[in-house]
Image (cartoon, helix red, strand yellow):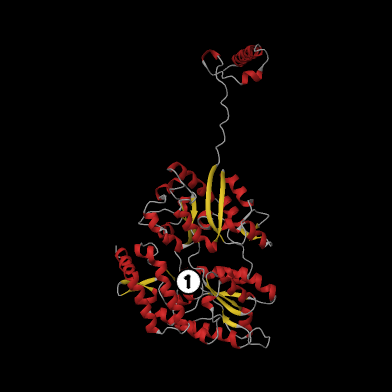
Amino acid sequence: MTKKSFTLLLSSLLTFSMLTAACGNNNNGNNEAAATKDSGTSGGTNTATTEPAPEPEKPTEIKIMLPLNTAETPPDTIKAAVEKLTNTKLTYQFFPADTYEEKLNSSFATGSLPQVTYLKNQTTFIQMKESIKDGQFWEIGPYLTEFPNLNKLKPEILNNTKVDGKLYSLYIGRPLARQGIIYRKDWADKLGLKAPANLDELLAMAQAFTEKDPDGNGKKDTIGLVDRNELVYGAFKTISSWFGTPNNWGEKDGQLAPEFTFPQYIDTMDFFKKLRDGGYMNKDFAATSKTDAVNMFVSGKAGLYIGGSMQDIDTLNKDLIKNFPDAVLDTHSMVAGPDGKFAQWMIPGYNNVVLFPKSAVKDEAELKKILTFFDKMMTPEVANLMYWGIEGTHYTVVDGKAKPADDKELIEREVKGYKDSVIGEYETNGMYQSLNVLPGRIHAEELVLENVKVGVADPTAALDSPTYTSKGVELQQIITDATYNYIYGQLDKAGFEKQVEAWKSRGGAAIIEEYNAVYKK
């Protein structure tokens, strides 16, 4: 293109631009009005107007029933924040954990369960299985793939909560094997004792803590082990696993059999009988509540606390050093059995589940709205809020982990009630792990990982037995009473085995048959 041609083209473009501007200025100068018109129609006619903003989605109203493990109902501090993040209006119905099963049963019987019903533990879940089979609750398995966060829940744990191969519940996750020993390391150091490597050394430590004045006050006022009236989450089941007892059920001659029919169960009872007869544990342990057992430990009366969770060391340490500022606690779990092997019983990966009653959730659309809430609960933002509280008030983030505030009473009062309801676990919901500073707690977290490596699963966790569902808790009381009576010296081995036969004759034999029928499939 020549310079002259370029000049003529530029001149033409300028002229066109000026004419266009002039036409625009003839629109009475009302540019704002013009902006609201749609000029994209044929002939430049402006006919359409801007669409109004869509109305905000109405919050989903959800009623939730759950057990309360604190003395007081929490305020709405956390709830209000959760509602904003999830676009919900939540009504929490908290009931004391000690009487929760009664409330659960009465609400179910009267058809007054709310849309979201938390059970209390694995036992209440088992008791509810027949009602689940009868179609009283929504099956949710087919919907999970529609929710990206719920779909992250661990399949192996979901399988452990299925009923007749179908999924009806969401789970509150827990580490598979948290149990072990919390002990007075300052007492052990004073007496020249190391953490017990085997059961003989555990017995020797309990004896030394009883007889060798570990607190140095010149009085014989201490015992080795403090235990409570709980064969599962107290010391008994943990020590029983160290003896090599199966986890609830085990294989014998190619058949599943209950744990109390194995010789290792008898060995465990004999071990406890030695502890009790020697005065190395509280003699009335079968009538001792968890609260009383904890109080004995933190008041300096006992040196060994075994069972449920080594993570309890934080609370025990906090209360213990109020009374004994120089006290030191540590944790331990690798105790070899008579065969020199290590073993730890494992839970099925959950300690509670959530169900959705058809009497309260009227249709599929309502169910999906409720599942949407739980899907949002499994985002890091909501999970951290419900589990840890409000950042800067209840916790701070240090090195990518949550450090609880010093005001433990505030956390207990405002957060604990909601913390116990969080679905999944940190691997699936992305919430912060705890920043641990207490050496014994740091050790506990390391041991939890080691426990799983030698973990023993319950082979019946995902199996159904109608007789166990209807009569299992009642029948278990026969074995519980017989176990205590054996340890107390009121039954010998023959007497205990007679009680096992009573268990079988009242329904236990049917349980064995039913479990084996599905186990072989």
Relative horizontal placement of residue 281, taking residue 161 as reference (left or right): right
| Quadrant where the image shows the C terminus | bottom left
Q: Residue at x 61, y 21 (%)?
A: 36
Q: How many marks?
A: 1
Q: Could you say which is closer to the camera, residue 308 or residue 107?
A: 107
Crowd rating for badge 1 (residues with CA inside 10 Å; few <14, some 14–19, many 20+): few
Q: Position of residue 94 (x, y in %)?
A: 56, 55
Q: Could you say which is closer to the camera, residue 487 or residue 148?
A: 487
Q: Position of residue 30 (x, y in %)?
A: 67, 16
Above or below: residue 505 compared with residue 189: above
Tell me the residue that label 1 is attached to: 232
Q: Position of residue 245 (x, y in %)?
A: 41, 76
Q: Could you say which is closer to the camera, residue 495 or residue 206?
A: 495
SS for callout 1: loop
Q: Residue at x 55, y 14 (%)?
A: 45
Q: Residue at x 65, y 70 (%)?
A: 318
Above or below: residue 163 compared with residue 62: below
| Quadrant where the image shows the N terminus | top right
Question: Does residue 208 show up?
Answer: yes
Q: Position of residue 185 (x, y in %)?
A: 61, 79
Give amino acid for label 1: Val
Q: Residue at x 64, y 51 (%)?
A: 77
The quarter holding residue 51 reads top right
Question: Does residue 457 show up?
Answer: no
